[in-house]
Image (cartoon, rainbow, N blue to C red):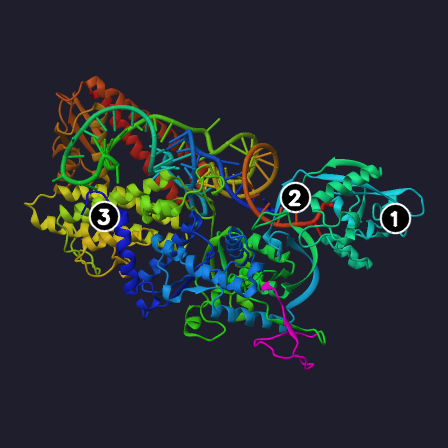
Amino acid sequence: MNQTYQPEEVEARWYPVWEESGSFRPEVNPDGEPYSIVIPPPNVTGVLHTGHALDHAMQDILIRRKRMQGYAALWLPGTDHAGIATQNVVERELRKEGMTRHDLGREQFVEQVWAWKAKSGNTISTQMRKLGDSTDWSRERFTFDEGLSAAVRRVFVTLYDEGLMYRANRIINWCPRCHTALSEIEVEHEDDPGELTYIKYPFTDGSGHVTVATTRPETMLGDTAVAVHPDDERYTDAIGKTVLLPILNREIPVVADDAVEHEFGTGAVKVTPAHDPLDFDIGQRHDLEQIIAIDTEARITEAGGPYVGMDRFEAREAVRSKLRELELIEKVEEHPHSVGHCSRCHTVIEPLLSLQWFVKVQPLVGPAIEAVKNGDTTFHPRRWENSYFHWMENLKDWTVSRQLWWGHRIPAWYCDACGETIVSMDDPTECTCGSAELRRDEDVLDTWFSSALWPFSTLGWPDETDDLARFYPTNVLVTGFDIIFFWVARMMKMGIHFTGEAPFPHILIHGMVRDIEGKKMSKSAGNALDPLELVDEYGADSLRLALIQAAAPGHDIPLSIDSVDAARRFGNKLWNAVRFVVEFMDVTDVPMDGGYPDHPGPEDAWILSRLGSVASEVDRLLDEYRLSGAFAVLYNFAWSEVFDWYLEMAKSISDADSGRQKVMRQTLGVVTRDVLKLFHPVMPFITEELWSHLGDGSGLIITAPWPSLPTYDAPGEMASLQGVASEIRQFRSQHQIGRKIEIPVVVTTTPDGALPVWWYSQIASLTGASPKPGQRPDPVAGYTRVFAAGVEAYIPLAGLIDVDAERPRIEKAIAELEAGIAKSKGKLDNANFRDRAPADVVEREERRLAEIEEQLANQRDHLAELG
RNA sequence: GGGCGUUUAGCUCAGUUGGCUAGAGCACCGCCCUUACAAGGCGGGGGUCACUGGUUCGAGUCCAGUAACGCCCACCA
């Protein structure tokens, strides 16, 4: 073994071994209970970012532990076809060659995308392998593969038959750059300085004008009314009159509608039913004409008269200057407001009247809310449930059609002869009216439509497969809060509607990975850490540990190079510790298939009892999805107790005491073995490597049984051993007495009679002192004392230090003890405390006070005796 | 306009039924190349737990309010 750990070589070696051994398949534990997680499918276009690295590390930890616990653990991998994102990428490539998708035509373009996917679609899986993800590749799926496409079609047809899928003319969010409709949540609202323009609309009867306020003057070209609130006294006379729309000189009515706010602007609003959702509603109520004034390119249509063909923002200025010329602008005010942008390309969204397919969500919502309310599904942390409820309760119908070519094509055919719409599982050849002139809908479905089916479609649904029966519902979903609405809520709705069961009982929500200043990592900001580069430099285990350590439940995760480097140093520590155990302590006969020492010595019983409580603490925390807490406990135990205290104690046993040495080394091996197992879920590579060195090279840690150990009682002397050793070390350190100088120590008082021999020899080897049992020195001047856990020991100062140099140390100790006493007395002197606090708390406090008081008395005597 | 989160050591953060003298990593100071690891060991300094009030025998922890920062949602055009 090398003196430093080389992750690159080790990590490259183990992944294929695991994969070829079949360990990633649930069949590796044929009799185990099923445990399953479906991966949040990354976009095929994508490359892994640190957010994936965290998300995957968490899932891998859960899966690897369950696998070791004997479950038939399935982590199902796959990717999402990512409609808009992927189409955009391929279109961008085409553009480099001076082409658009229209030059190729639909069929060829889609072929091109598949070709692109074949070429670069395995980037993700290569990267996942580098992270160590133990996914079952034999079950890998793609949202656009044959099986999932069949599931999508079945769901579409069923929803249509149930009346939950319909086509309608509505105001939708249109991206003029992507040329498609978007759903509400694909629109990101951003603050915009904005201006509110007050425009005068003259009454046709010559009785003056009404002033309306708008942030989008260009939409006046599509105005078909002015609306005021029915109770607004300022406009009582105006209702029923008509005004002349400036520029276009169209006569439009003034209508009364409750939706108009008194306070905003002038209290009168221009109504553009084809370009604003609120205006659309008003238009419906008053039967207003819908004039489309802006087209799918965001240019003014012929309805816009002189502005036809002009871009919407140019038109805004043009309209405004024309109105100014006509002296119809009353004023322009600054008006900060928020403007919707396409979440894909950031273009300003155009609300557009358009014929689209919608999912009627209301009937799906109730059961999805109920499942969380009644505890079938629980969020971790719980507070996300409120966001989930709030969002669900305010849902509007889901626009699912997209004007793209890459995606599941909508299975609807239209008959031009009779106007019939046919939606069916099989492609129809003729209409019920006998016409064979059927036209298939050109649009595809929102990518999230297929993602919503992911937990059951990937397992074979709608077929009743063995996997579906066995692994659905899945056990837990792990994802970021940013896609609760996009994905989690929709999986709940679809899962319950189509299978009758919520897709998962637990939803583990994690935060976003951020840089050390708390900023979101992004390429453009230049603060993004590339997980693959970190893996290359520090190893996947280091990245995983650093991410998990920082991932407190429900909070964002600050990631810095330093934290990854600290994790790497821990790996190196582990590496060297095991190397020492194997090479220098000669520990090789470890029972790798389980088993614990039957007759441990006192130090062994101590570390085994600690191991036992740490293992159950780790289990408890992992069961509660508190991953960072679990590994913090383990990390501290491994570093400071096993590979520090215990390893140091194990070193001290001499070859002469071969019986004791044998047991201790065996214990060291067993504890090391279990520490490796407990760490395996978070640091799979290094633990697998070390496992191979610790054992005889047969068997893998990935499928080794999770630790489960008998109870051991720690010897009572450990507290005084650690305490006295620390005190002597402190004495050495403060007086700068090198380790080579032996310190004679007389141990005089013991709590329960004589201290055992091992206690003395451990103190000697841990501190370089030579402790001996004896009487209190007389005279005591010239000695200093140390105390811990009822044990008292004297150190002669002659030849070591000047007596005066020791005084400050004692004085400081006295001051600390006095402070403790003051606090403790304050509590105990309070009658209410004695009356109302639980008896055990009071008792503990009394014991504590007695202890401190005794120590204080000792230290005071000691100070006086120093001479 | 609603809702949520955060505020603890110089930095990044733990601290889950309220109860020993509030912890870790990094950074800092001193000593030590002791049979693994100097990427290490030992020891040390450093905190009025944002502020105000309340509940309680007892509050970093529970409640109310304030402030700062951050996030999400929202059809006042």
Query: Are the two marked residues, 2 and 3, in contact with CB atoms closer than 8 angstroms?
Result: no
Specify the quadrant that holds the C terminus of chain A. top left
Measure how far apart labels 2 and 3 are at the Cα level: 61 Å
Q: Nearer the viewer, residue A394 or B66?
A: A394
Q: Main secondary structure of the magenta part?
A: loop
Measure how far apart labels 2 and 1 are at the Cα level: 30 Å
In the rendered image, the vertical position of residue A325 relative to residue A468, given as above or below: above
Amino acid at circle 1: Val
User: Looking at the image, which residue is at 47% across and 75% down?
Assistant: A463
Which mark is in front, 2 or 3? 2
Magenta residues, start to end? A420-444
Q: Which residue is the site of mark 3?
A: A607
Mark 1 closeness class: few <14, some 14–19, many ≥20 residues within 10 Å: many
Residue A853: quarter of image:
top left
Q: Which residue is the site of mark 2?
A: A338
- Label 2: chain? A
- Label 1: chain? A
Q: Nearer the viewer, residue A421 or A803?
A: A421
Measure how far apart labels 1 and 3 are at the Cα level: 89 Å
In the rendered image, the vertical position of residue A274 relative to residue A655, given as above or below: below
